[in-house]
Amino acid sequence: MSVYKLTGTLLDLQSHADDIDPTTFKDTADSIKFDLDSEYDDCLDFATNIESDIDGIDKEIKKLRDRKKAMKNSVSYIRNIIATSINASGRKKVKTTKHTISVPGSYKAKAIFNKDTIPASYYDTKQVLSESRVKRDLMSGKEVGDGKLQYTLNITVR
């Protein structure tokens, strides 16, 4: 049986507690609680497996991002070799059987710098919402836009 059904059965039993013999009520409630405990264990084992899958997916995403970056670097490296070679040969345009390659003769500028040495005036500023301040003000009863508090139960598993 599922946690929902067992909880519903327990609540139904509790609503009829006055109509049932106390010993029968206790035995039945204990049995349902025992089944619930077993279901809790199964659900938490399932949740642990999902968390493990999430960790694996995160690692795979990182691997794929690293691979994508390496592939982009390879493409850039190959194109740079070709552009340098064409430029060194004194040509601006080369037509092969499959491609027409143009090198205008000018290089793309790339800024290389140490972020610590750049003045603050070169940084863009953007507003960052302080969610902790919003939460604190909402909890103290202040109205903050259309903000509202949503309460959830916390669970601790050891």
Image (cartoon, grey):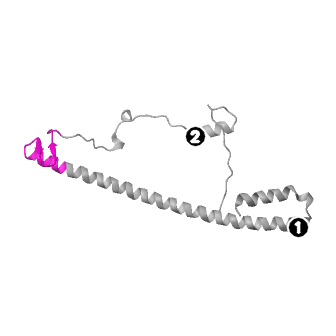
Q: Which residues are magenta?
A: 80-106
Q: Earlier in the sequence, mark 1 or mark 2?
A: 1
For discs 1 and 2, the disc positioned in front in the rendered view: 1
Task: Please give the residue where the numbered disc 2 appears in the rendered image.
Answer: 131
Q: State the residue at coordinates (70%, 67%).
A: 38
Image quadrant occupied by the N terminus: bottom right
In three-dimensional space, the C-alpha distance between marks 1 and 2, rounded to whole angstroms, equals: 51 Å
Residue 147 at x, y percent in the picture: 63, 35
Q: Secondary structure at mark 1?
A: helix
Looking at this view, is 107 or 60 the one in front?
60
- Residue 158 seen in the current view: no
Image position of 77 (left or right of 88): right
The picture quadrant where one finds residue 49 is bottom right
Q: Which mark is residue 16?
A: none
Given residues 20 and 85, the one toward you in this image is: 20
Q: On the picture, is 145 further left or further right than 33?
A: left
Q: Nearer the viewer, residue 147 or 49?
A: 49
Instruction: Tell me where residue 81 appears, x and y as whole percent.
Output: 17, 51
Q: Amino acid at mark 2?
A: Glu
Magenta stretch: residue 81 in it?
A: yes
* Residues marked 1 and 2 touching at CB (< 8 Å): no
Left or right: 35, with 120 as reference point: right
Residue 28: x percent and y percent? 83, 66
Q: Which residue is mark 1?
A: 24
Q: Against 144, is 55 above or below? A: below
Residue 62 shown in magenta: no
**Which quadrant does the C terminus fall into?**
bottom right
Question: Left or right of 86: which side holds 116?
Answer: right
Question: Does 100 sit above or below residue 155?
Answer: above
